[in-house]
Image (tube, rainbow, N blue to C red):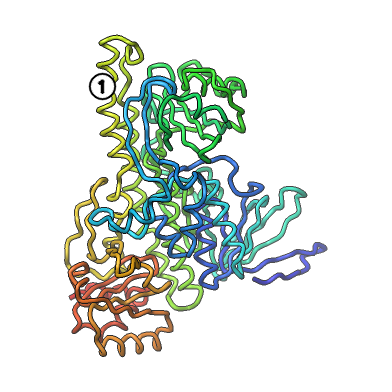
Amino acid sequence: MLVGRSVLGNALETRLTASVLIVGGGPCGLMLANELGRRGVSAILVDEKPGTAFNPQANATQARSMEHYRRLGFADEIRREGLPADYPTDVAYFTRYTGHELARFSLPSSSRAGELIKGLSGSWSAAELPHRVSQKYVEAVLRRHAEALPGIQLNYGHRLMGYVESDEGIVGEIERLDDGSRFKVQADFLVGADGPRSTVRQSLGIVYGGETGTQRDFMGGRMLAVYLRSPDFYASVPHAKAWMYNCFNGDRRAFMASVNGRDEFAFHTQLRPGEDENAITTNEAKAAFQRACGAPIECEVLSFLTWTAGHALVANAMQRGRVFLGGDAAHLFTPTGGLGYNTAIEDAVNLGWKLASVVKGLSPPTLLDSYEIERRPVALRNTDYARRFADSLGLFAPAHDIELDTDEGREARRIAGAYLEQHARAEFNIPGVTFGGRYDGSPIIISDGSAPPPDAANVYVPSACPGGRAPHAWLEDGVSLYDLFGFEWTLLQFGEAVSTRLAVSDAVRTLGIDVKLVTLPEALHDLYEADLALIRPDQIVAWRGAAAQAGTIERILACALGHDAANSARLAS
């Protein structure tokens, strides 16, 4: 990263230089900074906030995001954040929190997750299980690791005022908010990860498409979010602890996530007709929580704000020239399923290795066209899944007598409990959503003509059909197959083959890239249904084939790097 000073008229201008200018310091921007910094690519990040998130925001890290954190080396650190190690991550439903328990979907604590995952197979054949942790903790870890990387500069309390794009790159004008001083950033590329009101997206004239303004009995309309501290909550509630507390009655529907497992909670409730969001006070926010509790449990309101549920929006484009969109700037979710933040993480992973490959001269700039080609269909898929979960929960309305201690009330609770238990399994046991996103049709995926498995929310079928996540396995001594992958490219071979080793050496020498050859036992051949499999830096299968094709590895790698994407069909044949 270079710092220069030049005279413009009578003004002395400070100009910073980096390969990538990132606007937005949430999960997407911070993850991108980590991906770039780990590859020796310089980046300057700016964000208007004074620091990482204070409010809890997203509360669920899916298993695929945890696998990426594992790839970067800090999954265990993330898993130690948030709830205590022995805290259950159950999803529970109540008429009110001190009232009747209707249903409960039991999920393991973080201390059990590491060992439990090693005994799972099929849909949950993975390196990591999900982790229930508030986004505020995740952002702090991502920031800490990004700041430690050479060439990465994080600037909170700064905003992008505007930018100019030319054939030479991007020049962005940045303002420091505390004193109004300004400086310029010269970069090769600009990434807008600056949220739903994205300045970068608006500058490109790109709009969201999809569904918005959906009204439901719950999770459709204006919502009140309250971050609160209540040391007496657990002692006041006559039920086993849960991670997610849902309130289901005709008066005050809500959900609440435990933030630290002791006394902090993220409470969300739908505003009812006649409630004026502009007139809400701290006392009214406190009263909303207490109505959901069904008791005057004391609490301290740390912050509150309003937001809108009912979005399933995706930007009509995710790239224009040297400018890219990721995270909420590119797609906006209703938070059922916890898919918004996790989709943002995978945006950053996908874009990160591609930007680095272009900046280093390993790939042509046309490689970057594959970012939108690959990620936008996944965004459309994931927002649709989140909408379905919101419909399932929000369109199921409570019976009017569900809180009554009568035969009718008991029957209403039985019916509601059965439905909500089924819903919880559908929303919170989603390996298909988590692992099943695919990049079929991408110009840098070399198809072998095989059909991918069906896409289903609650079932994931591991498959090495090119374009999807690499099938996972646990090896001897509890070693994850993913831990054997290289940080960049990996070629798996099932059984030793000298010809493959020589072909990889030639490809590395010619293309200048990092390829790790991993030899696996023949017993794992059936998992990939091929002698060889090429794994991208984002753990996606780019190609698979027979040992006889080892001599074409250089051409296959060149195609996967974006050099000759038009030849992918020919290579596949």
Mark 1: amino acid: Arg
522 lies left or right of 434: left
524 lies left or right of 52: left
Residue 479 location (% of width, % of height): 35, 68
Q: Mark 1 points at which residue?
A: 414
Front-lying residue, 426 or 164:
426
Q: Report the residue at 50% width, 24% height from top.
A: 236
Circle 1 — which element? helix
Binning the other alpha carbons within 10 Å of mark 1 as few (below 14), some (14 to 19) or many (20 upward) gives some
Q: Is residue 451 above or below residue 138?
A: below
Residue 203 location (% of width, % of height): 54, 51
Q: Is residue 158 above or below residue 271?
A: below
Q: Report the residue at 42% width, 66% height from top.
A: 368
Residue 407 location (% of width, % of height): 26, 10
Front-lying residue, 100 or 287:
100
Query: Disc count in the image?
Result: 1
Does the image show residue 207? Answer: no
Q: Report the residue at 51% width, 73% height from top.
A: 359
Q: In which quarter of the image is the C terminus?
A: bottom left
Residue 133 location (% of width, % of height): 48, 46
Front-lying residue, 356 or 138:
138
165 lies left or right of 338: right
Q: In which quarter of the image is residue 149?
A: bottom right
Q: In this view, does 352 lie above or below 403?
A: below
